[in-house]
């Protein structure tokens, strides 16, 4: 029978707390961890950070003391889940290696979501954003080679190609052009709402991560690269959060968050190859089933609404980490030349010459159109004799981004 978290029995909330040594899990071995196990950990960390921050925001918008206590209880557990997951990352993995893995997550998560998104507008938005994180992966991979003499292929394990996407210096848009049209929770397929929440949480974690660690390197080029890409992650959060239906009540949003956590842990439990991680996803799923039950009770008592009416009858098709090379090449060929005008994704050459896109780019890239994301490739070419790419499926699908070897 199909899985429905609403009819499962979870772990009672007061039995969900773990002690320090249970939370301080043995980190994975960076040499042998499967790339997509690492990716699943990064996504679930982002989902838990969102659960925590959403819980805090909700608590700051109510005067109901019982609700504040209930939120504090669940949130303490979300924090523990976040620790258990994020502490899986070993200290021997450098910040830059983790960064490359974050961008692999952005690429293959967004690619899967785009291919499985029923709403045509949202799908277009994911494909648009996909090409931007794809480019970040390439820029950071070059920094990794230059600073640490490490090849990003060891991290992505050949599952994701590394070559230019929409060049980052073209991604800078006026803030008005990153706000998208929102889904309608009453007419949208529930999976669309879950997709928007998941991708927003992942991008938000990337944004927070760069906000905090981008100033840790000593080398000026590394600091500059993080700074520029961090601003794009702000754009991405703006874009994806605007897909979510902000007309939902706080309680409805809480139910959706908890349902999504069930969906994500259920998905990852199905496909996890590392038995220790599989066990962790299963444990957390059993906690989330109870969080969902609590949230549904709150929806009934506060909003006087029926949670079944807003949730799928059974869990949707599982969200899957898989290699998406061919699909990404197609999107590169078709959509590299796009930008945004208001809520619309449009070809760059359709913009009038006085469009705010030009002015905004001139302001941030400066009068000489310099950007650290271009500079890193120049520096890598002069330091190492060539830039770093991982093109396992042949030449770049877009002519002007083909690899011009330094020696040629
Ligand atoms: Fe959670
Ligand atoms: Fe990115
Ligand atoms: Fe991003
Ligand atoms: Fe939860």
Image: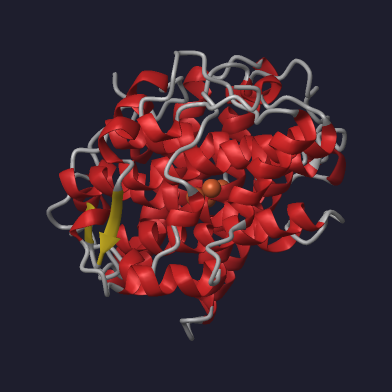
Does 110 sit above or below residue 211?
above
Task: Tell me: 379 left or right of 204.
Answer: right
- As drawn, the residue found furthest toward the front would be 408
Task: Tell me: 201 left or right of 48.
Answer: left
Residue for point 57% across, 45% down: 12
Residue for point 45% across, 62% down: 172
Residue for point 59% across, 26% down: 389
Residue for point 50% across, 18% down: 271
Q: Is residue 85 visible?
A: no
- Image location (x, y in percent) of residue 129: 38, 47
- Image location (x, y in percent) of residue 85: 69, 39
Question: Within the image, what quadrant is residue 223 found in?
Answer: bottom right
Q: Is residue 34 visible?
A: yes
Does 330 sit above or below residue 94?
above
Q: Which image quarter holds the C terminus?
A: top right
Total marks placed = 0
- As drawn, the residue found furthest toward the bottom would be 63
Q: Which image quarter holds the N terminus?
A: top left
């Amino acid at each position: 029978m199909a899985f429905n978290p609403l009819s499962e029995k979870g772990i009672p909330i007061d039995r969900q707390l773990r002690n320090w040594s249970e939370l301080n899990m043995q980190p994975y071995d960076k040499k042998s961890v499967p790339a997509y196990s690492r990716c699943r950990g990064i996504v679930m960390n982002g989902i838990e950070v969102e659960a925590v921050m959403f819980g805090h925001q909700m608590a700051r918008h109510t005067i109901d003391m019982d609700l504040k206590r209930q939120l504090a209880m669940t949130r303490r557990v979300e924090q523990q889940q976040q620790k258990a997951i994020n502490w899986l990352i070993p200290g021997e993995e450098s910040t830059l290696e983790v960064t490359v893995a974050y961008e692999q997550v952005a690429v293959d998560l967004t690619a899967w979501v785009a291919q499985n998104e029923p709403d045509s507008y949202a799908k277009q938005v994911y494909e648009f954003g996909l090409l931007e994180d794809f480019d970040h992966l390439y820029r950071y991979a070059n920094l990794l080679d230059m600073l640490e003499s490490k090849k990003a292929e060891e991290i992505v394990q050949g599952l994701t190609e590394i070559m230019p996407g929409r060049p980052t210096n073209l991604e800078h848009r006026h803030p008005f052009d990153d706000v998208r049209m929102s889904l309608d929770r009453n007419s949208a397929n529930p999976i669309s709402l879950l997709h928007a929440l998941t991708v927003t949480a992942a991008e938000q974690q990337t944004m927070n991560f760069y906000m905090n660690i981008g100033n840790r390197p000593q080398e000026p080029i590394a600091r500059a690269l993080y700074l520029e890409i961090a601003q794009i992650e702000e754009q991405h959060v703006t874009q994806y959060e605007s897909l979510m239906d902000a007309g939902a009540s706080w309680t409805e949003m809480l139910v959706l968050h908890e349902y999504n956590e069930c969906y994500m842990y259920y998905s990852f439990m199905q496909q996890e190859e590392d038995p220790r991680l599989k066990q962790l996803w299963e444990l957390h799923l059993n906690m989330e089933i109870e969080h969902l039950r609590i949230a549904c009770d709150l929806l009934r008592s506060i909003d006087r609404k029926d949670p079944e009416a807003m949730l799928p009858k059974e869990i949707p098709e599982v969200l899957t980490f898989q290699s998406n090379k061919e699909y990404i090449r197609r999107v590169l060929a078709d959509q590299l030349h796009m930008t945004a005008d208001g809520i619309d994704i449009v070809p760059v050459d359709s913009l009038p010459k006085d469009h705010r896109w030009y002015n905004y780019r001139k302001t941030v890239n400066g009068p000489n159109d310099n950007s650290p994301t271009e500079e890193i490739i120049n520096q890598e070419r002069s330091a190492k004799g060539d830039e770093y790419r991982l093109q396992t499926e042949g030449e770049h699908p877009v002519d002007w981004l083909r690899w011009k070897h330094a020696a040629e």
